[in-house]
Amino acid sequence: MQLKESACEENFIHEAKVAEARKTLVQGDDGEELARTFGALADPTRVRIISALLETELCVCDISALLKVSQSAISHQLRQLRDMRLVRSRKEGRIVYYTLDDEHISELFLLGSEHLRHK
Amino acid sequence: MQLKESACEENFIHEAKVAEARKTLVQGDDGEELARTFGALADPTRVRIISALLETELCVCDISALLKVSQSAISHQLRQLRDMRLVRSRKEGRIVYYTLDDEHISELFLLGSEHLRHK
DNA sequence: CAAATATATGAATATCTGCTCATATATTCA
DNA sequence: TGAATATATGAGCAGATATTCATATATTTG
C-alpha cells in the first residue's frame, strides 16, 4: 500500500465525518469474524440449505437429494455452517438432523431476500 | 457427483419433512443472487467500510485513510458494494461520497453483530 | 492550458474456496 | 460378527477473489 500518495492520508479531508465514522467502526478482530459469519451465507449451496431448513429439520441425506448435491459436498458445507453456528445438529441412530441455530439465522436470510426484492 | 450411492437419492428418507423444505426452498437463480448479496458482506475490508458508514457519509479518500487500506483497494471494494446495492454514491466536484443504500444494510449488519455476540 | 488531486479500473498474482474422490467412522440389522 | 447404511473428513484441483501496480478519467486551481 502506498500511504503517502495523497494529501488525505495525512490530514483527513472531513474531520467531523471521520470522527463519526470512528464511533461505529468495528474493532480489532470483529471485522474478520463478522465477515466470516456473512461468508457462511455467501454460497448458493449454503443459501439453499438454509432456505430448506427455514421451517423444518432435515437429515444430511435428504438435503443432498433435495438439492441434488453430493453427500460429501453437503457434509462439507454443513460443517462450515455448524462452525459459524448457523445450524445445529442432533443425532438419532445413524441419522443426523440439522436445524437453524436460532431466530437470527432466518431473520438474516429473510432480510437479505427482502433487500433483493427492493431493487 | 455420485447420485446413486445411497438409497436416499431415490426415495427420500423423510417425505413429509422434505415436502415442508420444498415450500421454503429458494427458486432458480435466487440462491445465487442471495449468496452474492451476503458475499458483499463477506470480507473484513467491506465489513469495516459498512461499519464506518453506519452513521455518516464518507469520501473514498477518508475511508482509505481511516481503514489504512490503499485507495485503489477501497475503490475496488466500493464498486462491489455499489454493484450489490449496499452503498450509494453522490459526487460533489471531484469528491465522491458514499452512504449505505437503505435501512436494510444497517439492519443486516446489526443482526450479524448480534448473532456473534450471542455465542 | 498545465499541474495537482480524487477516484476508477485493467492486469497480474497470491490466496482462498467448493467440489470430487477416496476413505474413515459410527450405527443398525441380519 | 459381518454387511449395509448414514455421515464425516483429508487431499487435491479448478475456479473465484482481494490486493497491488500502473494508468486512466475527471475536476479544480494556478
Image (spheres, coloured by chain):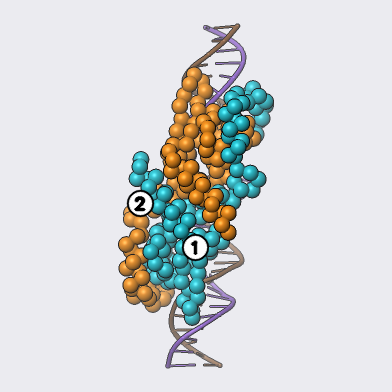
Chain colours: A orange, B cyan, C brown, D purple
Residue type of the residue flagged with mark 2? Asp
Tell me residue B46's x, y (percent).
45, 58
Q: Which residue is depicted at the point 46% across and 42% down?
A: A105
Q: Which residue is depicted at the point 38% across and 64% down?
A: B55
Q: Which residue is depicted at the point 46% across and 71% down?
A: B97
Tell me residue A9's x, y (percent).
37, 72
- Indicate which disc residue A6 carries: none
Residue type of the residue flagged with mark 1? Asp
Q: Quadrant of residue A18?
A: bottom left
Residue tagged by mark 2?
A: A29
- Work out whether residue A102 or residue B46 is closer to the camera in this orientation and state it: A102
Give the number of the mark in front: 1 or 2.
1
Query: From the viewer's perspective, is residue A96 above or below residue B94?
Result: above
Is disc 2 on the same chain as disc 1? Answer: no
Q: Which residue is depicted at the point 44% across and 40% down?
A: A103
Q: Does residue B45 show up? A: no
Tell me residue A118's x, y (percent).
56, 57
- Work out whether residue D7 or residue C22 is closer to the camera in this orientation and state it: D7
Residue tagged by mark 1?
A: B101
Tell me residue C10's x, y (percent).
61, 66
- Work out whether residue A107 or residue C30 is closer to the camera in this orientation and state it: A107
